């Protein structure tokens, strides 16, 4: 099976480390900058919960600044988009070029609206929803710290591929040692991940702490209220979610499972990069405004993160 990972930062590189070990997968890993260049030259190093070295010849590493050979056009059976939210539109165009007519694409990046972007580029018959709770961060170019095991959930969109269509990709994940499952309710899975992201990412970024430190009562109360604001808006959009008590337990579980993780938004703030706040808390605020539901915690957190990184609000 030919699989391409587009936008291979921390998460994409972690998944690449697993998938490169599967003898039945031909893997392409597309990245940019110093991290991408280091992988092209020397391969990929994974440390933390697992120690893995992927030689540069174990996968096809490509660099955004150089481009992708034209002979790869239309050759991919599956494409995983794992880049920053701001890059999903351009990566969707690249996916359109690389994907087979019968191939499947999924975006595992944080935020709302990515599946819709992919559908616009590829058509609904080639797109599924996806989320993951695997935790990773990048201490230096070419190296990924595996910070927390999680689950990959792939889900069906209206008029999208069925589980039977997606089974080869699910099997590739399983062979690689990645925990994965299928859901018939893709949009609900995406919303569930967004609720976790809006609760964890901005508060960890503003506080400068690892995920596990959000279990402390004052920070946890703020995270939970932010999550429940989003849940009220999702339910108004007729998205079926668990009750509030179940959502609270889920937040606690994820914080425990990724307790050593520096979330991506914290990494971005520390590096002075733009964040994904416009696709998370601010996107929730905007959806709430359209249906007349306020989200003051999300609005405040969004404003504070945007004040730290003004370029992050370019939606």
Image (cartoon, rainbow, N blue to C red):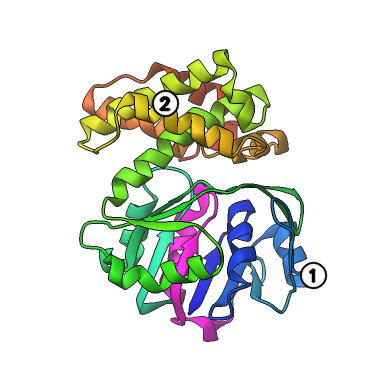
Q: Secondary structure at mark 2?
A: helix
Quadrant of residue 50 within the rendered picture: bottom right
Residue 283 screen position, x and y as percent: 39, 34
Q: CA distance from mark 1 to mark 2?
A: 43 Å
Vertical side of 214 occupied by 239: above or below? below
- Residue at 61% over, 65% down: 18
According to the picture, the residue beneath numbered tag 2 turns out to be: 248
Q: Residues within 10 Å of mark 2 (few under 14, many from 20)?
A: some
Q: Mark 1 or mark 2, which is nearer to you?
A: 2
Res. 149 mark: none
Vertical side of 72 occupied by 35: above or below? above
Pointer 1 or 2: first along the chain: 1
Horizontal side of 281 relative to 13 (left or right) equals left
Q: Secondary structure at mark 1?
A: helix
Q: Residues within 10 Å of mark 1 (few under 14, many from 20)?
A: some
Vertical side of 254 occupied by 299: above or below? above
- Residue at 45% over, 58% down: 180
According to the picture, the residue beneath numbered tag 1 turns out to be: 42
Q: Residue furthest top?
A: 218
| Range covered by the magenta-colored residues | 69-98
Locate the C terminus by quadrant.
top left
Residue 51 screen position, x and y as percent: 74, 59
State the residue in front, 121 or 182: 182
- Residue at 44% over, 39% down: 279
**Does any portion of residue 117 appear in the rendered image?**
no
Q: Are marks 1 and 2 in contact (CB under 8 Å)?
A: no
């Amino acid at each position: 099976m030919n699989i391409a990972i587009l936008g291979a930062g921390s998460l994409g590189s972690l998944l690449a480390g697993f998938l490169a070990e599967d003898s039945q997968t031909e893997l392409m890993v597309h990245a940019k900058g110093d991290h991408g260049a280091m992988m092209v030259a020397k391969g990929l190093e994974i440390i933390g919960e697992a120690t893995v070295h992927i030689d540069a010849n174990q996968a096809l590493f490509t660099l955004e600044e150089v481009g992708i050979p034209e002979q790869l056009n239309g050759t991919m059976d599956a494409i995983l988009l794992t880049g920053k939210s701001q890059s999903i539109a351009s990566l969707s165009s690249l996916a359109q070029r690389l994907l087979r007519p019968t191939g499947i694409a999924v975006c595992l990046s944080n935020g709302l609206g990515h599946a819709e972007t992919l559908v616009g580029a590829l058509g609904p018959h080639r797109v599924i929803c996806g989320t993951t709770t695997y935790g990773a961060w990048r201490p230096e170019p070419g190296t990924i710290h595996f910070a927390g095991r999680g689950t990959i959930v792939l889900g069906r969109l209206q008029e999208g591929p069925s589980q039977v269509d997606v089974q080869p990709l699910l099997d590739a994940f399983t062979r690689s040692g990645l925990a994965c499952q299928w859901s018939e309710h893709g949009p609900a899975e995406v919303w569930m991940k967004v609720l976790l992201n809006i609760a964890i990412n901005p508060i960890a970024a503003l506080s400068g702490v690892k995920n596990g430190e959000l279990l402390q009562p004052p920070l946890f109360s703020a995270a939970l209220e932010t999550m429940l604001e989003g849940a009220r808006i999702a339910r108004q959009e007729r998205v079926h979610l668990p009750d509030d008590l179940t959502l609270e337990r889920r937040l606690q579980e994820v914080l425990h499972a990724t307790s050593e993780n520096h979330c991506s938004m914290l990494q971005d703030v520390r590096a002075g990069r733009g964040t994904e706040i416009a696709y998370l808390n601010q996107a929730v605020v905007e959806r709430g405004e359209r249906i007349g539901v306020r989200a003051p915690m999300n609005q405040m957190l969004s404003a504070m993160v945007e004040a730290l990184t003004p370029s992050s609000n370019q939606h």
